[in-house]
Image (spheres, helix red, strand yellow):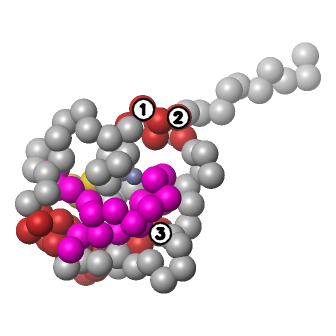
């Protein structure tokens, strides 16, 4: 596992009614929370948003209608994102650029 985004466990699907979706970074299905400042749903564990490429892949959020229903469900749940919550630091490690190749010289 580590920093490699993981696939949903078998049978796990995004549930727009309660705002629960798979988080590929936490490797768990979690009840997402609403970030009112940015108007996005985030994973409560690591803070990744539903606009993240791997979150969209894992949950089928390329389907715009599903994603809108999901965001609405999270908003309706009144679970809110608290700034500084989550493990954003460990998540950033995933996206650090590879160190430059020193080359054959
Ligand atoms: Zn997460």
Query: Is any atom of residue 60 visible in this view?
Result: no
Cα–Cα gap, marks 2 and 3? 20 Å
Label 1: which residue?
89
Q: Quadrant of residue 98?
A: top right
- State the image coordinates of residue 2 (x, y, percent, origin top left): 60, 45
Q: At numbered mark 3, what does the secondary structure look like: helix, strand or loop? A: helix
Asked if 65 appears above or below 103 in the picture, the reply is below
Q: Residues within 10 Å of mark 3 (few under 14, many from 20)?
A: many
- Residue drawn at (70%, 25%) of the image: 100
From this viewpoint, is residue 19 visible? yes
SS for dot 2: helix
> For mark 2, does the 10 Å Cα neighbourhood hold few (<14), some (14 to 19), or many (20 or more) residues?
few
- Say which residue label 2 marks: 93
Q: Is residue 99 magenta?
A: no
At which x and y percent is residue 47?
Answer: 32, 46
Residue visible at 90% across and 16% down? 105
Q: Quickly name the residue at label 3.
A: 58
Marks 1 and 2 sit apart, C-alpha to C-alpha, by: 7 Å
Reading the chain from its start, which is encountered first: label 3 or label 1? 3
Label 3, label 1: how far apart the Cα atoms are? 21 Å
Left or right: 84, with 104 as reference point: left
Q: Earlier in the sequence, mark 2 or mark 3?
A: 3
Residue bounds of the magenta highlight: 18-35
Q: Is residue 46 left or right of residue 38?
A: right
Q: Of helix, strand and loop, which mostly describes the magenta segment?
A: strand
Tags 2 and 3 in contact by the CB under 8 Å rule?
A: no
* Tag 1 secondary structure: helix
Say whether marks 1 and 2 touch (CB < 8 Å): yes
């Amino acid at each position: 596992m580590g920093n490699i985004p993981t696939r949903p466990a078998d049978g796990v699907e995004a549930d727009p009614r309660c705002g629960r979706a798979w988080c590929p970074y936490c490797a768990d299905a979690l009840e997402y929370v609403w970030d009112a400042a940015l108007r996005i749903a985030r994973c409560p564990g690591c803070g990744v948003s539903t606009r993240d490429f791997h979150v969209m892949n894992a949950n089928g959020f390329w389907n715009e209608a599903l994603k809108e229903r999901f965001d609405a469900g999270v908003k309706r749940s009144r679970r809110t994102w608290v700034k500084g919550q989550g493990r954003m630091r460990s998540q950033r490690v995933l996206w650090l650029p590879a160190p430059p190749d020193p080359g054959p010289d």
